[in-house]
Image (cartoon, grey):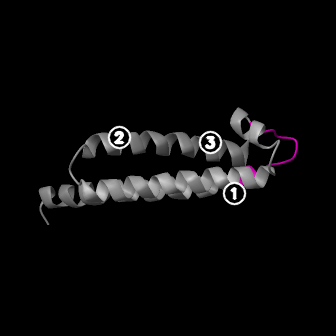
Amino acid sequence: MRIDQRTSMISRYRTPSLLGVVAVLQILDWHSTLTAGHTRGEANKIVNWLVQWMSFACVVSIIKVISLTMLLVGFLYWRKHKGLYELEFALCLSVVTVVYGGVVFNNYFA
């Protein structure tokens, strides 16, 4: 296998892999938010506002389902337009991955 073939293979699976990692981090964020100790409060003001009408678990679950649906739409868009803004899409997903990784780490270990 030549170097350019390996690079091609890495770039071919980069975006779906990043989307998968973000989806897993979304699920871990959902779990860590729902299992957080009762002494910790939610920092998101929109979630706190919506809790007036629904339970906390329901609000967080709805938000996570919407987020996962947006990831699915992003994947379908990427699949339809492969190669168009590939680098920019991968960079944005990388930033989202780092941020969500920090959020999940904070939820579990803080």
The residue that label 2 is drawn on is 91
Residue 31 has which mark?
1
Residue displayed at 48% across by 46% down? 97
Q: Classify mark 3: residues with Cα within 10 Å, few (<14), some (14-19) or many (20+).
A: some
Instruction: Determine the secondary structure under disc 2.
Output: helix
Measure the C-alpha gap from mark 3 to mark 2.
19 Å
Instruction: Determine the secondary structure under disc 3.
Output: helix
Looking at the rendered structure, the number of numbered marks drawn on it comes to 3
Instruction: Determine the secondary structure under disc 1.
Output: helix
Residue lying farthest to the bottom in this orientation: 1
Residue displayed at 70% across by 45% down? 107
Q: Nearer the viewer, residue 13 or 59?
A: 59
Q: Where residue 73 appears, x then y in whole percent?
A: 42, 55
Image check: 31 left or right of 85?
Answer: right
Please say whether residue 24 is one of the residues in the magenta stretch. Answer: no
Can the viewer see residue 28 in this picture? yes
Q: Where residue 7 appears, x then y in whole percent?
A: 20, 55
The residue that label 3 is drawn on is 103
